[in-house]
Image (spheres, rainbow, N blue to C red):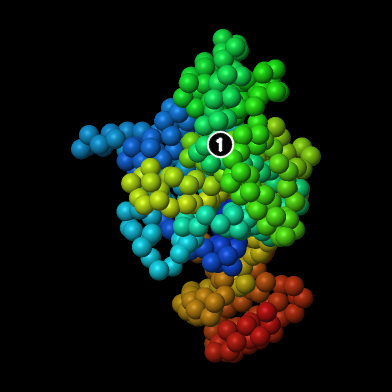
Amino acid sequence: MIRLPRGTQDILPGQSEKWQYIESTFIDICRRFNYQEIRTPIFEHTELFQRGVGDTTDIVQKEMYTFEDRGNRSLTLRPEGTASVVRAFVQNKLYGSAKQPQKLFYNGPMFRYERPQQGRMRQFVQLGVEALGSKDPAIDAEVIALAMTFYQSLGLQSLKLVINSLGDKESRENHRQALVEHFNPYRAELCSDCQTRLDQNPLRVLDCKKDRDHHAMVDAPKILDYLTEEARLYFEDLKAYLDASGIDYEVDSNLVRGLDYYNHTAFEIMSAAEGFGAITTLSGGGRYNGLVEDLDGPATPGIGFALSVERLLMALENEGVTLPVNEGLDVYVVSLGDIAKVPAYTLTQQLRKSGLSVDKDYLGRKMKAQFKDADRNEAKFVVVLGEEEVNLKQAAVKDMTTGEQEMVAFDTVVNHIQSKR
């Protein structure tokens, strides 16, 4: 038997409805915030992620699914969504649109070669937004508010928002030098990855999962101590907008995020629910002024976030939140005998055209078995057609909630059921 690849999953009926509900809720929230959908390819040229995500990141160095096509071009299954959205923004000259900033959202599978564990798959689904064209800290607050609104609209209550500033270019350069001077005496004690990061991108040492408990981490230089006045004021403005929105947050100077393109605002939303697990992050994002230029576009500020649907489902389950899905069929049509087959099929189609969810028997089962199938499908109404009903040009309509049953003329069955809903 051929099995699915490690780190992937089949989303079966009964579960897929939850995904659909989550996706439709996300689309509705984005509509309220005036974000429009963008769809990008599942694979891109490898260079996009090398330049856009960063050569020093674990994603590029260890986790990408990269292959050569028949034209010897190096292609990569997208490991995240931002680089693709920015590439589309540049290639399609969306920066020239009269509608600015460009407020975009996406939904789709991403791929990373990681050790599979609960809530972390090799193929996973991200929902995300990107706002390109504004350097106003108010839009940073808006992006955060969108994410929080989405989670809360699904029923999550135990949420924790953590924010930080990564500063501007001057702030980061000063902080980088301080980090190198601080960690150099401990270089030999750090993991091999961090020894490399110390030369290439010292900020990412703070994000290391292996060395997080090293004593040198405790008093490592904090980026907030190295902010320029402009960067400090930007962060203060962001906090003021969040305060005005009634959004609670914590400032964590060690929050750096795992991608090279972030600056100024960085944030994560975590589950604070008891028993959720060691990895509590549900989503994360931040500002990436400079990324558009790195991908050959004009100077354009941007900010966005992405969230994992898999981890969201874990959080919903952990908090005992039941999504309003799997509400059953509106109607199940029971047919008895050959004479009722065509009328039953015709009535099924008419009911569907009226907007109702409807099914019928296709296995030639007895009436009792058909009623059992109606129960399995949680049908609200059952319509019975047999020889007698066909001859009388009527149907027996049973309300499965009240148990009431009445005979209804064929040509009024649709209206009758619609009036009872």
Type of amino acid under label 1: Ser
Which one is nearer the viewer's eye here, 387 or 417? Answer: 417
Residue 284, above or below 151: above
Residue 421: x %, y % from top left:
68, 79
Judged from this view, the residue extending furthest toward the front is 229
Q: Measuring 79% from the left and 39% from the top, which residue is drawn there?
A: 274
Q: Is residue 40 left or right of residue 229?
A: left
Residue 344 visible in the current orientation: no
Residue 378 visible in the current orientation: yes
Residue 360: x %, y % from top left:
54, 68
Q: Measuring 68% from the left and 57% from the top, which residue is drawn there?
A: 241
Q: Quadrant of the N terminus?
A: top left
Residue 267, above or below 357: above
Tell me which corner region of the image, top left, top right, bottom left or bottom right, holds residue 242.
bottom right
What element does badge 1 sit on? helix
Q: Measuring 64% from the left and 65% from the top, which residue is drawn there?
A: 328
Identify the residue position indicated by label 1 in the image.
Answer: 171
Q: Is residue 340 left or right of residue 281?
A: left
Which one is nearer the viewer's eye here, 273 or 304? Answer: 304
Badge 1: residue crowd in 10 Å (few <14, some 14–19, many ≥20): many
Q: Is residue 371 left or right of residue 59?
A: right
Q: Is residue 261 left or right of residue 40?
A: right
Residue 310, above or below 325: above
Residue 338: x %, y % from top left:
48, 74
Residue 103: x %, y % from top left:
49, 60
